[in-house]
Image (cartoon, helix red, strand yellow):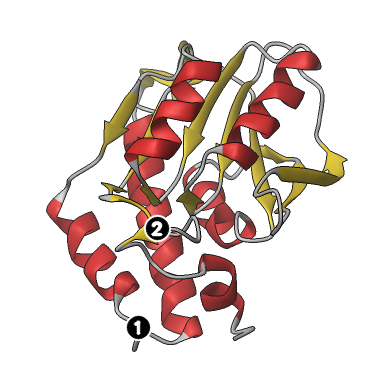
Amino acid sequence: MHVEVKHPCIQHKLAILRDAETGHKRFRELATEITMFVCYDALKHVEVENVSVETPVATAQCQKIANDIVVVPILRAGVGMLDGILGLVPTARVGFMGMYRDEATKKPVEYYNKVPANRDALYIVIDPMLATGGSTTAALDILKKNGVEKVIVVCIVTCPEGIERVEQSHPDVTIYTAAVDERLNEKKYIVPGLGDAGDRLFGTR
């Protein structure tokens, strides 16, 4: 299952993010803002618990998030989304997964894995571009192998090919995104996409 969050504010920011003339500083800022909007929607069904809070006037019956939340950026581009989620859920813990796409085979290769273990937590896998779905699927495979039961994916842009691959391998995982683009090109880049999100985030090209 996937959810495309089409709020006008998101789409406005996405238009600027896509622009080839947008520099890396502004690109980072927009990625953070879009991530916060998409994650806001993604967490609307998170479990809550009732709590009593003493205001200056009286006791208020309130709700607080009951789940522990673990955010898992896929390195390196996923780091560019991290502040957006932590701005929304500052108590979340953070794990990291290093994946790169082998240019010859186009398959993901894991090179780093440091993720907090908590069977009861909600895990949020983040990566700006869900293209072939290879890295995301591999990350989900690893998490589930380690006992994770509740996990969602948050990205900025995806495409039908990436969605299909994740849904085939992990039909229980919901993908939240700001846009579902047309397709992958022959180089496995999303069209029209954003270009190389990692390079644009960190000014490496």
Q: Residue under circle 2? A: 185
Residue 20: numbered disc: 1
- Using a 10 Å C-alpha cutoff, classify the residue at mark 1 as few (fewer than 14 neighbours), some (14 to 19) or many (20 or more): few
Q: Is residue 172 left or right of residue 185?
A: right
Quadrant in which the C terminus appears: bottom right
**Residue at mark 2 to residue at mark 1: CA–CA distance:** 18 Å
In the displayed structure, 9 sits above or below 99; it is: below
| Quadrant of res 180 | top left
First of labels 2, 1 by sequence position: 1
Q: Position of residue 90 (x, y in %)?
A: 59, 45
Callout 2 amino acid: Asn
Element class at badge 1: loop
In the displayed structure, 111 sits above or below 25; it is: above
Q: Is residue 102 left or right of residue 137?
A: right
In the displayed structure, 203 sits above or below 14; it is: below
Q: Position of residue 111 (x, y in %)?
A: 86, 48
Kindly tell me whether residue 70 is visible in this rendering: yes
Q: Nearer the viewer, residue 178 or 30?
A: 178
Residue 109: numbered disc: none
In the displayed structure, 21 sits above or below 2; it is: below
**Residue drawn 33% across and 27% down?**
2
Q: Nearer the viewer, residue 165 or 70?
A: 165
**Residue drawn 50% across and 61% down?**
187
Element class at badge 2: loop
Quadrant in which the N terminus appears: top left
**Residue drawn 74% across and 48% down?**
99
Q: Nearer the viewer, residue 181 or 42?
A: 181
Q: Position of residue 95 (x, y in %)?
A: 75, 40
- Using a 10 Å C-alpha cutoff, classify the residue at mark 2 as few (fewer than 14 neighbours), some (14 to 19) or many (20 or more): few
Callout 1 amino acid: Ala
